[in-house]
Amino acid sequence: MTEAPKRVRVTADLPPRRPATLTRGIALPGTPADEADAVYARALVRSQLRLALGTIAGFVLVVVAMALAIALIPEMDRIVLWDVPLSWLLQAYAFYPVILVFAVLYARTAARNERRYRALRDRE
């Protein structure tokens, strides 16, 4: 009976370690951390968070208003298009344009916030 060869772990030599500078997660490794960059980056994060929360709140408000209008206005059931009541058509298709509008507004405003951040960062 032949014995199976012994397993050998092969590793690469580790590169020499340099002392890491404190960057708070905004600078690339090896680049100096600038306090102004940190302030601008935190401001950008805060503005993007405010934008996201405002967009979500507005979207929820509009969707709830549409759902209440569909539920509370019984005259919509009397209007029939293509043998389907208007309230059904609104429930099936009216929310997609609202989603699209809020998505486009959010994307444009977020891009504007980032352009302003870059302009502030590059001005120095």
Image: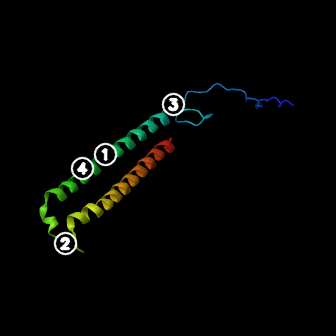
Q: Are marks 3 and 2 in contact (CB under 8 Å)?
A: no
Residue sitting at 84 percent across and 29 percent down?
3
- Looking at marks 4 and 1 on the same chain, the residue that comes earlier in the sequence is marked by 1
Amino acid bearing label 3: Arg
- Looking at marks 3 and 2 on the same chain, the residue that comes earlier in the sequence is marked by 3
Q: Are marks 4 and 3 in contact (CB under 8 Å)?
A: no
Residue 2 lies, in percent from the top left, at 87, 31
Q: Is residue 22 left or right of residue 63?
A: right
Amino acid bearing label 4: Leu
Q: Which residue is mark 3?
A: 24
Q: Which residue is mark 2?
A: 80
Q: Which residue is mark 1?
A: 54
Q: Secondary structure at mark 3?
A: loop
Q: Is residue 28 left or right of residue 66?
A: right
Q: Mark 4, residues whose alpha carbon is within 10 Å: few (<14), some, or many (≥20)?
A: few
Q: In the picture shown, does residue 29 fall above or below 102? A: above
Q: In the picture shown, does residue 29 fall above or below 116? A: above
User: How much space separates mark 3 and mark 2, taking CA atoms?
Assistant: 60 Å
- Looking at marks 2 and 4 on the same chain, the residue that comes earlier in the sequence is marked by 4
- Looking at marks 1 and 3 on the same chain, the residue that comes earlier in the sequence is marked by 3
Front residue of this view, candidates 110 and 64: 64
Figure quadrant of residue 47: top left
Q: Nearer the viewer, mark 1 or mark 3?
A: 1
